[in-house]
Image: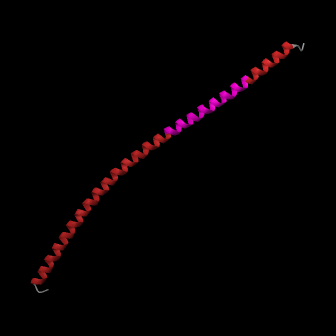
Amino acid sequence: MNGPDDSRAATGETAISAALARLTRAVDRLEAAVDRRHDADRSVSGLEAQLQRLGDDRSELAAMLDTAEARAARLEDANREVSRRLVSAMESIRSVLEEHGG
């Protein structure tokens, strides 16, 4: 019963087994590639969300800076006005003291 047909059948089974093994490896590689792509897509989505948050934070910080700069300008104006008034008051006091011999 070990004739030429048996040899061809064994060779055919070996070829099918080898082809099935190659197909299995190819499917495994494809699944791994899909997983990597899925992970990369999630990573990109995460980066986009983080970039959006950074942009929002930047806008908020810019608004806070504008507010702080405006406040600083108002304080500088108030400081100049107070200094002007103090100089005026000191000149008035000096004038009064000179008039009264002080």
| Image-quadrant location for residue 101 | bottom left
Let me know if residue 102 is in the magenta part: no
Quarter the C terminus occupies: bottom left
Q: Residue furthest right?
A: 1
Front residue (pair 29, 61): 29
Quarter the N terminus occupies: top right
Residue 34, position in %: x, y?
Answer: 59, 31
Position of residue 84 relative to residue 23, above or below, is below
Its colouring scheme is: secondary structure
Q: Residue furthest front?
A: 4
Q: Residue furthest bottom?
A: 101
Residue 39, position in %: x, y?
Answer: 56, 36
Q: Residue at x 42, y 42 (%)?
A: 52
Q: Is residue 63 left or right of residue 9?
A: left
| Image-quadrant location for residue 6 | top right
Q: Is residue 45 left or right of residue 81?
A: right
Q: Residue at x 46, y 40 (%)?
A: 48
Let me know if residue 38 is in the magenta part: yes
Position of residue 58 relative to residue 3, above or below, is below
Residue 40, position in %: x, y?
Answer: 55, 37
Q: Residue at x 34, y 52 (%)?
A: 64
The rendered magenta stretch, by its main secondary structure, is classed as helix
Range of magenta residues: 19-45
Residue 36, position in %: x, y?
Answer: 59, 35
Q: Is residue 18 left or right of residue 84?
A: right
Q: Residue at x 79, y 21 (%)?
A: 14
Labels in figure, total: 0
Front residue (pair 24, 61): 24
